[in-house]
Each structure stands twice: as C-alpha cells, then as structure tokens.
Image (cartoon, rainbow, N blue to C red):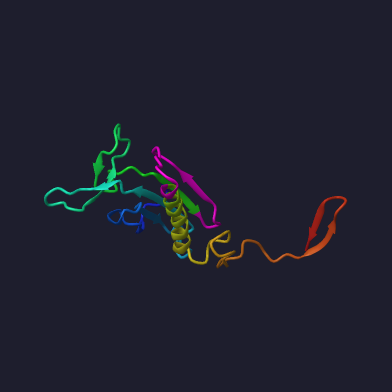
Amino acid sequence: MISKTLLSTTILGDFHEHEDEYHIRIFGDEKEPGHGIYWIDFQIFEVIGYDWGAGVKGRKFFNLKKSPRSPEPVYTYDEAAVIVEGFVKWDGCTQFDFPEGIHVDSKRHLDALFSAVCRARELASEAMPGKMINDDYGGPMPIDEPLAPSLTVAAIDTKAGTITLK
C-alpha cells in the first residue's frame, strides 16, 4: 500500500439482518501539494459473525489475518484478514489482490463480494473528483489538466497505416 492516510470507512450490508457485510477502507495522499489525490488504495474486510456473550452482545467480528483455522474472531481492522485489496489510479486503472483465501457459499455471497469490490472503485473515484478519465460508472469524466496538447488529424494513409497529426 502506497497511501497511508485513511480517507473513509464504508459499510455495505448488515450481518445482523442476515446480509453479507463488508467494510471498505480507502486511503489516499496528495503526492504533490496543490494537485489533489491521484492514487487511492483500498482494503475490503468481511464480517464473519457476531458475539452474543455478556457485555458484547451483537459485536461484529472479522477473521484473524493468516488464521490457521476459521473462524478466529478479531475485532479491529489491524488484526483482521483483508480479503481484497488494491488501488485505483487517476486514469481509472484498477489493481485487485487477494491476500487471503476467499470462501464463497453461494451466488448471493459472490454477488455481494463483487458489489463490495465495485463499490471500492466507486469510492476511489469519488475521492479523486475530476481526475478519472476511464470511468465505466458514468462515462468519461473531465480532468482538470489536459493530458496532451490539442491535436487534429491532418491526413490518414490507409495503405501505409499511418495518421498524421498537426
């Protein structure tokens, strides 16, 4: 992970309502002062249960990182297994990594996981307003700085397979 500043934590679903629940954390740092954020890192955690013991009723938990058995309940993000992590760059390119094994019980569970991954990308886009130029969630978005000077096509040679710009 490149970015260190936590920007937000978003919760999708509600385990108490018998839904798959995922917590998405996004991180971003302004690399060059005055230019905004151009890179967002994200982590996705899965709630795997909740306690019903005295004093902790309803407290949700995650699985322990690199746990040799499952479930092994933990309650903090620092201890919890990250099931999907990655980054989104200013141009919309996205990288996903799966540092832990992922167990899927049903199509509904797979759909919920995929929704969490898509939401992580949307959150990254929202954290970089006006930056992402390759955004499938609403078409190309304008950027605040041109990528290249204005060019026009001067000639196309189909036999040679060349385009001349001016």
Task: Give percent across and percent down for residue 137.
Answer: 53, 62
Residue nearer the viewer, 76 or 28 = 76
> Which residue is at 30% across, 46% downward?
48
Quarter occupied by residue 133: bottom right
Task: Give percent across and percent down for residue 42.
Answer: 41, 51
Magenta span contains residue 92: yes
Residue 124 horizontal side relative to residue 155, left or right: left
Residue nearer the viewer, 159 or 146 = 159
Residue nearer the viewer, 65 or 163 = 65
Count of labels in the image: 0
Prevalent SS, magenta region: loop
> Which residue is at 17% across, 53% downward?
57
Q: Establish if 72 lies above or below 165.
A: above
> Which residue is at 88% across, 51% downward?
159
Residue nearer the viewer, 55 or 108 = 108
The C terminus lies in quadrant: bottom right
Q: Establish if 40 lies above or below 67.
A: below
Which contiguous range is marked in magenta? Answer: 89-109
* Identity of the residue furthest to the right in this view: 159
Task: Give percent across and percent down for residue 16.
Answer: 27, 55
Residue 9 horizontal side relative to residue 117, left or right: left
Q: Establish if 84 lies above or below 135.
A: above
Magenta span contains residue 103: yes
Residue 86 horizontal side relative to residue 137, left or right: left
